[in-house]
Amino acid sequence: MAEAVVNVSSIESVIALFGKFDENLNLIQKQYQAAVLARGNDIRISGDEANVKKAEAAVRALAEMADRGEQITEQNLRYIFAMVEENALEEAVKLTDGGICVTAGGKVVRAKTLGQKKYVDAIKNNTVVMGVGPAGTGKTYLAVAMAVKAFKNHEASRIILTRPAVEAGEKLGFLPGDLQNKVDPYLRPLYDALFDMMGAEVFSRHMEKGSIEVAPLAYMRGRTLDDAFIILDEAQNTTREQIKMFLTRLGFGSKMVITGDITQIDLPDAKKSGLVDAMNVLKNVEDIAITKFTEKDVVRHKLVQDIIRAYEKAYRN
């Protein structure tokens, strides 16, 4: 029987680490088959030597996150468990450093996984970035956060968000209203992210001024977009011609982020995705970065990771 003691800076951090009704504590004990008890500011861990060593590393990382005010959730608990297995804890703990921006509700937006941090760093350091990976990895949300940050810091005078209006088993013609009414449902995730970052009132004011634009991809043709932060979402549903058209809209002082999931292509007649094509054509072009996410970067419910993993396994063979 082995034992380890982790000293935590405050009782408040111990409470945050253990979670409501000790739900985090129970997950730690289940993960490492070890007993974890608090005695004041000390957390005592006992059990099999190898498991105690891993549990100690996880608890130290979680305590440091709690000290910095990071909320300990099931999602980041499981991420810390994965980082312990990969001996990458030091990098994972640094994820709590700083933040991208603060939402209208006062929440600090920050990278929650190493894949997300790599993506955010790529956006900072490159003019064009492609973020490719499964649902729930924060591709669009983090891109919008970076756009809002650039806008507030006067690094861009406009935010332009666009998506291809490609039908996923439904026909646009059956939707009521004019063209804008028909395409608005496709743009809703972009509206939602901006509402969250800026608040509905501020967002509406900037929309009226024209400093924020949310439009279908077809509206980009023939334009040159200077001094703007431009996001193309759901790019897996662009054709080769569409994504080339979009990329060549890039103007001086602008930045582009292209996001997509190449496992969810809804193009008709088995057309090749423009995103897949662009990743191959532009992979060696300077100032263009490609960030690939995996199921480890999923920040939604644990089942989303399990579903992605199950589908990958099923279609790998």
Image (tube, helix red, strand yellow):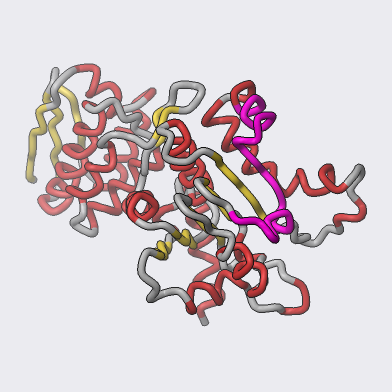
The answer to which quarter of the image holds residue 237 is bottom right
Is residue 61 on the magenta stretch? no
Give above or below for 265 relative to 49. below
Percent across and percent down for residue 118 are 33, 55
Q: Residue at x 63, y 74 (%)?
A: 240
Residue sitting nearer the eye, 170 or 76: 170
Where residue 210 appears, as percent x and y from the top left, is 65, 35
Q: Nearer the viewer, residue 281 or 137?
A: 281
Question: Which quadrant is home to the N terminus?
Answer: top left
> Is residue 301 among what the camera can see?
no
Q: Residue at x 38, y 23 (%)?
A: 21
| In-image side of 47 versus 291 (left or right) | left
- Give the residue drawn at x 18%, y 24%: 38
* Residue 86 on image: x %, y %: 23, 59
Residue 188 against residue 163 in the figure, above or below: above
Q: Residue 206, how many percent across, how many down?
A: 62, 29
20 lies above or below 255: above
Q: Which residue corresponds to the image point at 33% horizontal and 54% vertical from the top-left?
A: 125
* Residue numbers of the magenta segment: 203-224
Taking the magenta stretch, the answer to whether it contains residue 219 is: yes
- The answer to whether residue 203 of the structure is visible from this angle is yes
